[in-house]
Structure formats: structure tokens, C-alpha cells
Amino acid sequence: MRAPSNLNALRAFEAVARHLSYAAAADELNVTPAAVGQLIRGLESYLDIELFHRSASGPSRLTLTDAARAALPDLQGGFDLLSSAVERLKASKSRIVFTLTVPPAFADRWLLWRVERFQRRHPYYDLRIDTSGRLTDFTAERIDVGIRYGAGAWAGLVSTFLLRDEFFPVCSPALMEGEHALGAPSDLQHHPLIHDTSMTGAGLFPTWRSWLLHAGCRYRIDTDRGLQLNDSAMGLQTAISGYGVALGRTTLVERDLAEGRLVKPFDIVQSCELAYYLVHRPESAAHAPVIAFKEWLLEEAGVR
């Protein structure tokens, strides 16, 4: 028996399997029920198996056979991949605007200097990045994908773990020298503390008070004093200037440490249960831009 010449028979089977109705499948595929029936019979003949049990009465005249039920998820997954591949092929001939929402400090300190690598890999995508810092409505504002910092659960969104921070003091190399050089946590009494208030209200977010407790610092240090900023990147830039000591986060200070703008005066780090997650709407999971950006971002984050 000759194999079906195209995907029409498989599409007809998938549609009938979802609706358990030739008429509903025909309406979806814009053909006649008779044409759907002919495609199904041809597929069954080629495979030499029954795909449906048929009865003349009952609430549903069609039911899937065990073999059909077992094969259906793989077939549906295959159609999703085919749709994604077609989107990629279309995208290769025209530019697609892809909208991303991301916390401003993460964009400034981690993402933006890496974006060129994504653009080289996917030159047909034009990124539109929102760094407002607020929680956006993905549907109303037509957001394709986002990066959020938190516990990993946001209503109506699928989340994928990216990166987790450790927290530790950071400062300009200049503060490691002079009369009050930083050599032990107790030396913090001689320098202004720079406070990141961008996550005020998030109880799990480390503060100077929690870090000093974690470090076992018994020297009395007033953790209420110092400069308070509601922008993480601004706080780190202030530390780079030599004004004082900030509580750094792994993802935000990685490059500054590597290039010598900041140093870690102490080796004591505090962990945090909060983390960065990639988020998107469930229905966007098979969209080509989301797949492309997710694959690239997980690679950059070292997630396997």
C-alpha cells in the first residue's frame, strides 16, 4: 500500500482525535466530513491498524484505540515543531520585533553586554527591551518573554530557572588601602554603607543587617546608616566611585569584579532563595522567538 503523499491524513487523524468527530474535524480543516473519512481510512489502510473504535450509538460514536492514544502526543508535538520551524523560515526573510521585559539592574549589569551574541545568532529578530522594573501585563502589553526576580511563581506565566545570586560586600579597590583599609567586617564601621532598597518588602532579600548576622560580626555596626538607593545598578556604580561599600549580588557584579572595578574585601557570602527566572505565557511556549531566546539565555546562564 502506497504511503500518504502528504501530511493531510495525519492532520485529519489529529483533528478527529481531539474532537472525536468527523464533522468537527472537517469544519476545522475546511473540508467535507466525507473527505476526512477518506483520509482516515487511507491512513488506517497504510498502517494496517484501526485508529478509532466506531459505534452506531452512545454519547460518542468514535473512541481512540490504544495504539492511536499512545501515538497522539508525539504526533501533536511533531506538529508543534513543524509550526515553529515554519515560523523560523518565515522570520529568515523578514525582521520580527521581539519584546522583552527585564529588571533594569539585570539588563544593565548582565544582559545588555551579552545581547550582541543573540543578535549574531538570530539577526532577523529586533529586540525591544522594557526595563521599567514594574510587573507588566504580558497580554495587554504584548510582551513575548520576560526575566523576573523572585520565588519563581507568577500567576498566568510559565517560569524557567536561570540564575541564583550569592550576596557579599563589594567596594572600590581604593578602600583596601589607607588608614581604614577593609580587612575584617568590623572595619565597615569606618565606611558608608550603600543600601539596595529595590526589593523592600521581600523578606527573603538579604540586607546589611542579615549579612552581618550571617558573618557573625559581633562588633556593633549601625546598619541603618548610609546611603539608600532603590536602584541596584546605581548602588554598585556608587561603590565603584569609592563612596562606600555595597552589598553585591553575583550576577550584577560578575563583570565589575573580573575587570577590577570592584573587589570583594571578605570571602563571606550569604545565599538567597530568590532567583532570576525566564517567564512567558503558556501559549507562547511554541513560538519561534520565545524558543530562540530561551535556548540562547539558558546557554548564557549555564543552565543544562
Image: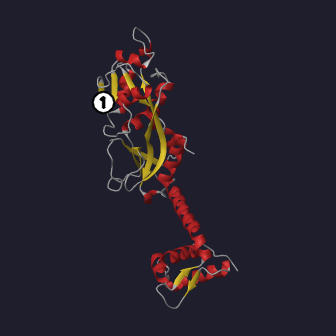
Q: Which residue is mark 1?
A: 229
Residue 86 seen: yes
Residue 247 seen: no
> In the image shown, does 302 or 222 lie closer to the viewer?
222
* Vertical relation: 14 (above or below) 139: below
**Residue 16: image location, x then y, percent:** 52, 78
> In the image shown, does 226 or 6 lie closer to the viewer?
226
Residue drawn at x 33%, y 47% is 135
**Residue 203: image location, x then y, percent:** 35, 39
Instruction: Tell me: 139 left or right of 268.
Output: left
Residue drawn at x 33%, y 52% is 137
Instruction: Tell me: 253 left or right of 220.
Output: right
Place residue 218 in its image quadrant.
top left
> In the image shown, does 296 or 106 lie closer to the viewer?
106
For this orientation, the residue located farthest to the top is 179
- Residue type beneath disc 1: Leu
**What is the quadrant of the C terminus in the image?**
top right
For this orientation, the residue located farthest to the right is 1
Element at label 1: strand
